[in-house]
Amino acid sequence: MTDFSASVPYLPPSSNKIRTVVRNRIIYTSHANKYRKQFMQFMASNYVVDLQKFAKECKDDFVATYVIEITLYFPLAQLINKGWETGKAQSYYKTMDLGNREKLLNDCIIKSFGGVFDDNVYFDILLHKRCDDINPRVDFNITKLPSGEMFGIPVPKRRV
């Protein structure tokens, strides 16, 4: 098994704000493109050696599978309804679909590795929502497994 871990100090926008339709094509919004650029610059500046090492280990390994664990740390104000104590809010927690953050984030992660693998090889995706007022961020860990055997996929015969 091989692992790659990173911590990025930028939270992705919700998927409700990342796509728009222009001339019958779905494209990323300027908000999403800004996040992608910011994410890529941060990864290139802070993880370039580790990215290259992990990408080299993954390149041309066509039977490997991957497990990704993502933890998003939000400021408390983005998680809690301040009207809860006065009875103005029906729920203590704000409505926030954690899964709405995943697609853009996964696209950014894959792109940071130079496209040596795609998210079609993720067999487990674990998402966590946490609170951190001081250091909002995204932490992620990718584990490369030698095959899909633990997911019930037979190890393929060697291709000629």
Image: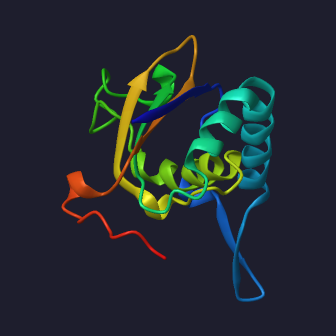
Residue 11 appears in view: yes
- Give the left or right position of residue 154, taking residue 77 as reference: left
Image point (65%, 44%), residue name: 56
Q: Is residue 28 left or right of residue 67?
A: right
- Residue 63 position (above or below residue 42): below
Q: Position of residue 86 (x, y in %)?
A: 32, 23
Residue placed most toward the observer, 103 or 155:
155
- Residue 22 picture quarter: bottom right
Q: Residue furthest top?
A: 134
Percent x, y of residue 64? 42, 54
Relative depth, front residue between 101 and 63: 63
User: Who's the residue at 49% across and 63% down the image?
Assistant: 62
Residue under the image location 67 percent in, 46 percent down: 113
121 and 104: which is toward the camera: 121
152 w.r.t. 14: above or below: below
Q: Is residue 139 left or right of residue 49?
A: left
> Which of the two residues, 142 or 106, is positioned nearer the viewer here?
142
The number of discs equals 0
Percent x, y of residue 118 = 55, 60
What is the x, y in percent for residue 111?
A: 68, 52
Specify the quadrant that holds the N terminus.
Answer: top left
In this orientation, does residue 80 appear? Answer: no
Residue at the farthest bottom position: 24
Q: Where 75 sits versus 14, above or below? A: above
* The furthest residue to the front: 160
